[in-house]
Amino acid sequence: MEGELIVADWTPEEHHQAFPGVLNGGIIGALLDCHCNWTAAYHLMKEQGVATPPCTVTADYAIVLKRPTPMGGPVHLSAKPVEIQGARVVVEGTLTAGGKVTATCRGTFVAVKEGHPAYHRW
C-alpha cells in the first residue's frame, strides 16, 4: 500500500508478448481487472471493519492502452477506490512501465453473497 493506493509489481515473461518487446493488451487487461478487483475487496473489508475481504466480481471495466508497454522489466500496478456505495466500488487503476503510464482502467466491482457462482471461488 501507498496511502490508499494498492500497489503491486509484476514481471512479464516472453510468452506474454503481443510482438517482440511489447506486452500483450489482453494480459494488461487481465492484470488491471484483477488488481482493481482486489483493491475493491480490500477497501470494502476495511470499510465494513471485517477481518477478511468479501468475494467481489467485476460488473464492468474499461481499459485505455495509452502506449506500448515494454517487456524489459517489471510493470507497476496501482489502484484506488473513487466511489464506494454499499457493496459496489468504482476503482481507477494504472499500469506503469519504464517510468511511464502505459494503461489505465476504471471499473465497477461488486461484493457477492452466498449463492452467487463466484462466491468463495478464490
Image (tube, rainbow, N blue to C red):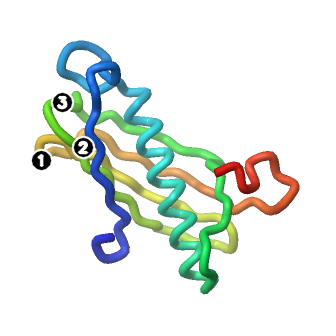
| Residue pointed to by mark 2 | 75
Query: Circle 2 — which element?
Result: strand
118 relative position to 45: left or right: right
- Is label 1 in a helix, a strand or a loop? loop
Disc 2 crowd, CA 10 A, few/some/many (<14, 14-19, 20+): many
Tell me the residue at 12%/47% (across/down).
Answer: 99
How many numbered marks are there?
A: 3
Q: Residue furthest bottom?
A: 49
Residue 38 position within the rendered picture, expressed as x and y whole percent measured from the top left? 51, 58
Kindly identify the residue that appears in the image at 27 percent across and 21 percent down.
14
Q: Position of residue 118 (x, y in %)?
A: 74, 48
Instruction: Identify which amino acid the numbered label 1 is placed on.
Output: Gly
Q: Which residue is mark 1?
A: 99
* Figure check: 68 above or below 90: above
Tell me which label, 1 or 2, sits earlier in the chain.
2
Quarter of the image where the N terminus is located: bottom left
Image disc number at residue 70: 3
Occupied quadrant, residue 49: bottom right
Q: CA distance from mark 3 to mark 2?
A: 9 Å
| Residue situated furthest right in the rendering | 115
In this view, the residue in front, 102 or 24, is 24
Q: In the image, residue 24 lies at what x, y percent?
A: 34, 24
Q: Earlier in the sequence, mark 3 or mark 2?
A: 3
Residue 26, position as x, y percentages in the image:
43, 27
Please give left or right for residue 26 compared with residue 94 in the image.
Answer: right
Position of residue 83 in the picture relative to residue 104 (left or right): right
Of 66 and 18, the residue lying toward us: 18
Please tell me how crowded label 3 is: few (under 14), some (14-19), or many (20+) other residues with Cα within 10 Å: some
Q: Nearer the viewer, mark 1 or mark 2?
A: 2
Residue name at image x 80 percent, y 46 percent: 117
